[in-house]
Image (cartoon, helix red, strand yellow):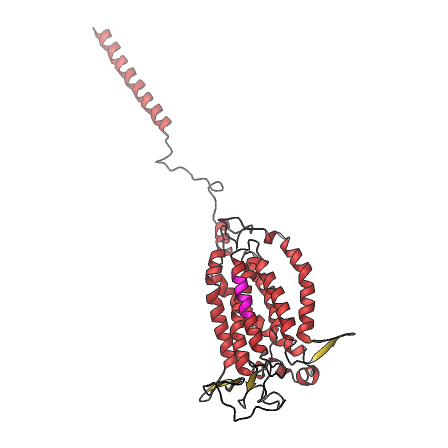
Amino acid sequence: MGTIPGTLAFLIDWGWLRIGPYIHINMDPALHLGPLKLTWYGMAYVVGIVMGLWFIRRYTERKGITQDQVYRVLWWCVIGGVIGGRLYFVIQQPDLVQGFLLQPWRILATWEGGMAFFGAIFAVVPILFWRAKRMRLNPLVMLDAGALFASCGQIFGRLGNLVNGDIIGYPSTLPWSTVYDHPSSWACPNPATCHVPVQPAAGYELLLNIIMLVVLVMLAQRYRKPGALMATYLFGYTITQFIVFFVRANIVVSLGPLDWGLKQAQWTSLIVFILLIPTTILFMRSRSAQPVPAGEVAATYGIPQNTAVVLPEEEEKEDSMPSQEETPVEPTSASRETPADETLSHSEDEDADKMVASSAQVSEEIEN
């Protein structure tokens, strides 16, 4: 398919966005502020994290997860997600040996582009499970919150993909086809995708992410079993990825002897979908997935909690201090006399007085 003629009139012409007959995106993927270069994709990641935190705030409070616990988990997930997403992208590349293993510094070069969200999922799910266990929270409740966070944050990531031009569909003449015109666009190093209308694959994924978020919000009010929300998200994500990659212009690969005309992400979606079936059945039968009764705190229901924590230093102090049984208190001279002793001494004094009085009386009778 050839390039778009320059004489066509645009229904909307804002410079960076032109509509008519197709959707033309003419944006530099980076914002230049003097020597500082900020990519729209990187800023979309930051906005996605912030909006994800805001979006799950009420949900986590309702489930009994404090904001402090959310932030203590967040940074583990951000780091793990970036590493997992990058590594899974790298191992899928056809030039893995020459382009990355022999140039290992390129593995960390995220600024060159390339993240695979499935890799982020593979890293973040066990991290959420682990951190919830450490904080004595139900890990399935934490995973449900993570599903809402991810579905919200992904929307902003797809906006970054639209600006970048790094998710390209097949050439198309549909009215909503996308055309990348900026020379710095990720689509323009390839003449076959620069100034050429293509399927807006990133736009399709954006719409699917919005639908997924709406579905999860509706189900979050209905589900009583922890983990069901994350299971819905994972099944939904594998299905949507399998579908949308039919219009993405990625390389078709085979899986061993299987050559079904699928892309790498479609094979991953298919395998993950199959593995999710027994995994979901197993976890939904676990103790952590039992329905939470009304009035109970979901995050801690059925999880033993520490009611008191004694520091090691305090334990040593308590051990070194003698107990009352070990060191009986010696009575002082002032406290040795008990009330019974006092009574005895008073009675002895009275007997002595009587004897004296009797002796005096006998003496008087003798004298008389």
Relative to residue 36, is residue 84 depicted above or below? above
**Left-right relation of 255 to 108:** right
Magenta portion: prevailing SS class: helix
User: Residue, x 59% and y 58% (percent of image)?
Assistant: 228
Instruction: Please state the horizontal and vertical placement of residue 204, each as a whole percent of the image.
Output: 57, 75
Q: Is residue 207 visible?
A: yes
The outermost residue toward the right is 257
Q: Is residue 133 visible?
A: no
User: Residue, x 67% and y 77% (percent of image)?
Assistant: 91
The outermost residue toward the top is 368
Relative to residue 130, is residue 250 depicted above or below? below
Relative to residue 272, is residue 328 depicted above or below? above
Q: Quadrant of the C terminus?
A: top left
Instruction: Please state the horizontal and vertical placement of residue 255, each as a whole percent of the image.
Output: 74, 74
Asked whether 286 or 6 is in front, the reply is 6
Whether 40 is among the magenta residues is: no
**Left-right relation of 168 to 31:** right
Q: How many marks?
A: 0
Q: Quadrant of residue 140?
A: bottom right
The stretch of residues the image draws in magenta is 209-217
Whether 214 is among the magenta residues is: yes
Relative to residue 100, is residue 225 depicted above or below? above
Asked whether 22 or 76 is in front, the reply is 22
Instruction: Please state the horizontal and vertical placement of residue 47, each as a whole percent of the image.
Output: 48, 74
Asked whether 249 or 34 is in front, the reply is 249
Q: Quadrant of the N terminus?
A: bottom right
**Left-right relation of 86 to 55:** right
User: Residue, x 31% and y 18% (percent of image)?
Assistant: 351
Instruction: Please state the horizontal and vertical placement of residue 353, each as a whole percent of the image.
Output: 28, 18
